[in-house]
Image (cartoon, helix red, strand yellow):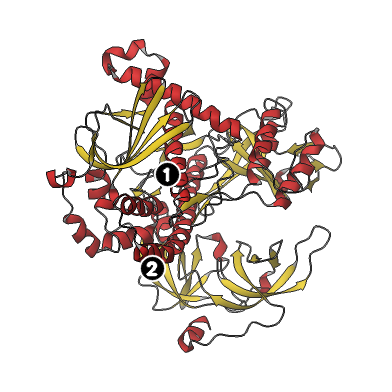
Amino acid sequence: MEEKEKETGKETAIPEGALQGVFRGSQKRFGFVTAEGEKEDIYIAEENTMGAMNKDQVLVTVVRPGEKGRRPEGKVLRVLTREIRTVVGTYQKTKGGGFLVPDQGKVGTDIYIPGGKERGAVTGHKAVARIKKYGDGIHRPEGEITEILGHVGDPGVDILSIVRAYDLKTEFPARVMAQTEQVPDSVSEAERKGRTDLRHLLTVTIDGEDAKDLDDAVTLSKEDGICHLGVHIADVSHYVAEGSPLDREALRRGTSVYLVDRVIPMLPHRLSNGICSLNAGEDRLALSCLMDVDEKGTVIGHSIEETVIRVDRRMSYTEVNRILRDPSGNQDEFGELVPMLLLMNELAGRMREKRKARGALDFDFPESKIVLDAEGHPMEIHPYERNDATKMIEDFMLAANETIAEDFFWQELPFVYRTHEVPAPDRIRKLALFIRNFGYGMKGVRSEIHPKELQKLLAKIQDSPEEALISRLTLRSLRQAKYTTECIGHFGLAAQYYCHFTSPIRRYPDLQIHRIIKENLRGALNAERLEHYETLLPGVAETSSDQERKADEAERETEKVKKAEYMASHVGEVFDGVISGVTAWGIFVELENTVEGLVHVTDLSDDFYIFFDEAYEMRGEQTGKTYKLGQRVRVRVKEADLTTKTVWFTMELSESSPQGADEREVPCMRS
């Protein structure tokens, strides 16, 4: 249907009263449509989906309005555009053909594979199928196998399946590699000309031990009470010309993708690990943000310059943190770096306090560190905590990003900003209503809330029994950050101006704004170039935001499958955890190792439990026993399903079970 409409080029009139929106599917074959201008998503029953799949653009009509806490219910009238073209799943052979059972639960239906279209696939093969005919809600979609990935359980097949499902490109096109081969291995004398030479400055990179693409370096000195902070970023745009094969491929990818067992880079390794990596002892081209910072942590002056730098030493977060904890004990090994690193830590602390004073939020959930063996099986999972060294580099990168964004905002030049909108009023009102039960309140609920109010709330609840509960709900009340051409500020950072400048190796928006900055420095932003960027940048912002979300989803999926595999070897064991979610169908529990699993409501065997959505709790009908968000519990591993990437728990009901609220910190919102 959709293909036919595209061929004719005719626009179909939208029926009166119909709404256009995006369909979101589910494993249970029903879905929801997010329609522009509608306050709530519209529920679509299985029989009313018209074969719509996840992320399809659809026309929908409301058949029953929402009332008494229930969502409005609708019916898909027509699928306008299809998002899913290929599906990854497990093949099951049947008489005369077979079916591909999708890994992506939101596809919502099996794909019929006619006989002769299976390309040798047998039951148990992981495979990729191209959809040839879409279903209509009555007939299943039909497709053909295009690639066999291997058998379920073969080493690496689980991650490869996710790579294919999210259409992540692991190889670069030949024309891109051909251009890459022309990139030099070292900086020439001609390339140094016209640049500010900063090779005399004591310069370090500070990254994780296993990092290979080092795109930021820092310098710091102090004179007459003023700190001179330099944030030096690899000049990737020097090697990736606008409109070149490298550039077009980088835009398509949008970002590097960090999976548990591999990195899928935005740029080929010859660039990202070679000439664009700020390797110690090598001359490198950079774009530097040189900031003067006073005793209060305020940037009082700055310059942006094309530079040539030479890193004196590559440092790891672990090494720097060790120096900060014991400066004298590391003097012999690190010499003149020690006083500079101590000064850096002092300056970063002042900058952090200044951001805190203006209302910046800092949700600090530990990330997962998953250790794999040679065949990709998980051996260990534990929280990866930020230390003083990681916070210090974050503080300096934030300062550079804000400084660059403010500079270009006031120049009124086309630019790409990193923005985070004010939370939706209905979400904040719901949060305010909930916290009143605990005696807390917030200002600005009826108009536009300031991040300072949420920061005050988080401070009030610190070390209280309800801290974990309210912190999680506060985080869920916020919107997702994105890229825009309008500078509308960053709510979570309480920043009026913000952009991404510091990682052009792995994020396309950073690479794009480097070009604008350099053209501006060279006086080359004439009327023609300004018009060019005005036309180009909205698409760059939208594509980059979409690719970032896809990468985040793929990263989470690979973590989930490895966590499920890890917990499969711990079935029957008991763990302590905290309730991270409460729904009508069960209770989500997060263990101390960051693994999250579900206690299904049918496994709450000591009573009949009722879900109270406004209180985020399950309550036993006979005993009155409650399970609340943030409560500490003890669970036993019941099952781990690698296909659905789900871990199932049961509650341990012994008298010794931990009670009360969890007192750990909550996750950090990504800027």
Residue at 27 percent across and 26 percent down: it is 202
Q: Nearer the viewer, residue 41 or 227?
A: 227
Q: Nearer the viewer, residue 498 or 369?
A: 498
Q: Which mark is residue 422?
A: none
Place residue 529 in its image quadrant: bottom left
- The span from disc 2 to disc 1 (Cα, nearest Å) is 54 Å
Residue 446 left/right relative to 411:
right
**Where 295 sits versus 369, above or below?**
above
Q: Label 2: how many residues lie within 10 Å, few (<14), some (14-19) or many (20+)?
A: many
Cβ–Cβ under 8 Å for marks 2 and 1? no
Question: In this orientation, does residue 52 appear?
Answer: no
User: Residue 250 at x, y = what percent?
Assistant: 34, 58
Q: How many marks?
A: 2
Answer with left or right where residue 555 lies relative to residue 41. left
| Point 36% across, 48% down: residue | 506
591 relative position to 380: left or right = right
- Name the residue rendered at 47%, 23% in the picture: 295
Residue drawn at (50%, 63%), measured in percent from left and top?
102
Q: Position of residue 592 (x, y in %)?
A: 56, 32
In the image, which disc is placed on residue 404?
1
Residue 121, which numbered label? 2
Q: Does residue 603 show up?
A: yes
Q: Amino acid at mark 2?
A: Ala
Mark 1: secondary structure: helix
Mark 1 or mark 2, which is nearer the start of the sequence?
2
